[in-house]
Image (spheres, rainbow, N blue to C red):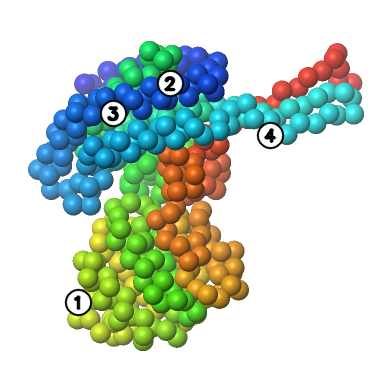
Amino acid sequence: MTSEEIKSAIWQMGAQARAASYALGKLSSEQKNAILLAMADALVARESEILEANAEDLAAAEAAGLTGAMIDRLRLTPARIAAMAQGIREVAALHDPVGEVLREWTRPNGLHIVKRRVPIGVIGIIFESRPNVTADAAVLCFKTGNATILRGGREAIHSNVAIARALQEGGTPAGLPPHSIQLIPFTDRESVRHMAEMDRYLDLIIPRGGAGLIETVVSLARMPVIKHYDGICHTYVDRAADQEMAIAIALNAKAQKPGVCNAMETLLIHRDIAAEFAPKIAAAMEEKGVELRGDPDFIRLSRSNRVVSATEQDWITEYLDLILTVGIVDDLDAAIDHINRHGSHHSDCIVTADTAAAERFLDEIDSAAVFWNASTRFSDGGEFGFGAEIGISTDKLHARGPMGLEELTSYKYRILGNGQVRG
């Protein structure tokens, strides 16, 4: 397709989405929930169709030489499709924030003002690799009365098309307005630019992917952007840590699912326990197949000849793989300074039995989610009780951290009078 043909198609989708958003605003919570349950059933009913589409994407990914972690992010299984459907049912069961009264008051002149939660309108979501994002993003936006235009990556195009079709066609008999969920069916890079310039129809755009994608969207966008930047997540093992707990948390944060944004990429160890703890964690990580890159002190104390020297780039790299950078720090102050300078303000953890140290860490680390004695892998909308999530924002406005239903709403003021005029 030519650039003009792509632009025309995307702008038509934008106009359709705007019309759908007005229709969505009229649906009651009960109607939306019934539609969501129909969507969930449609995903399960079309499992074989979705898996066939996913097999095409997996074959192309393997031929292109994608990493094992990237292929795992792309892969769908009957269990993963069932989990997507269950996530939709959980969203249906959640409280609908639309229509909530955030505040109301009466002015001395008798005007009654109500601040009420409303949908944002039309949301564009650009994402890479993970086809489950198609379902998660679409249903969260729908629950909050927003129309959605989705643009997935080339590597998951067949899976994404199949999932989006199942959601829209499955929800239609239950009352889903036409064009509520649209997926751009081509992957030309031009489509990103045309979406980002479509402020007439898109109220918000959310890029989920690598730094290059996010920087491109930010540079082009004519509407607000909520960024899902790198997950350079840290775990700091304090001198007062229970070391067995620290090993369990670190292993989970790194190795349980390394190809996701809330996986740990850097481990910091307090110098006072490093001689004892470094060889323990090195052995545990190597048993899980984790490649370790360390500073000179960790290399010396780990007693392992497999630890390689960390470069400056390693401290600011999101590996999304079984690779971990490890450093020894002098104290809590040094750990906080390192994380605030090298991290991505996503999710960071302290392991310690020292309450004062933990409170300082929780207060002073400038990240969207901070953990005390728990794996960063819990930085997730589902684990927070939000059902599915739209992403994890590393911004501070208007949403931060795992984005659930409330973060997909705005508000309006309703002013009730009885003839007041301003003098």
The three-letter amino acid code for the residue at tag 1 is Arg
The label shown at residue 306 is: 1
Mark 4 or mark 3: name the one nearer the start of the chain: 3
Marks 4 and 2: which is nearer the front? Answer: 2
Depicted 108 relative to depicted 352: above or below: above
**Which SS class for mark 1?**
loop
Residue in the image at 33% along x and 47% along y: 210
Residue 42 image offset from top left, x and y in percent: 31, 23
Depicted 205 relative to depicted 238: above or below: above
Residue in the image at 68% along x and 34% along y: 102
The three-letter amino acid code for the residue at tag 4 is Leu
Mark 2 or mark 1: name the one nearer the start of the chain: 2
| Mark 1 to mark 3 CA distance (whole Å) | 46 Å
Mark 1 or mark 3: name the one nearer the start of the chain: 3
Mark 4 or mark 2: name the one nearer the start of the chain: 2
Residue at the farthest left position: 63
Residue 323 image offset from top left, x and y in percent: 26, 64
| Mark 4 to mark 2 CA distance (whole Å) | 27 Å
**Which of the image's four quarters has the N terminus?**
top left
**Which SS class for mark 3?**
helix
The image quadrant that residue 53 belongs to is top left
Residue in the image at 28% along x and 76% along y: 282
Give the left or right position of residue 147, taking residue 44 as reference.
Answer: right
**Which SS class for mark 2?**
helix
Report which residue position mark 3 lands on: 44
The image quadrant that residue 263 belongs to is bottom left
The label shown at residue 35 is: 2
Residue in the image at 26% along x and 45% along y: 73
| Mark 2 to mark 1 CA distance (whole Å) | 54 Å
The label shown at residue 102 is: 4
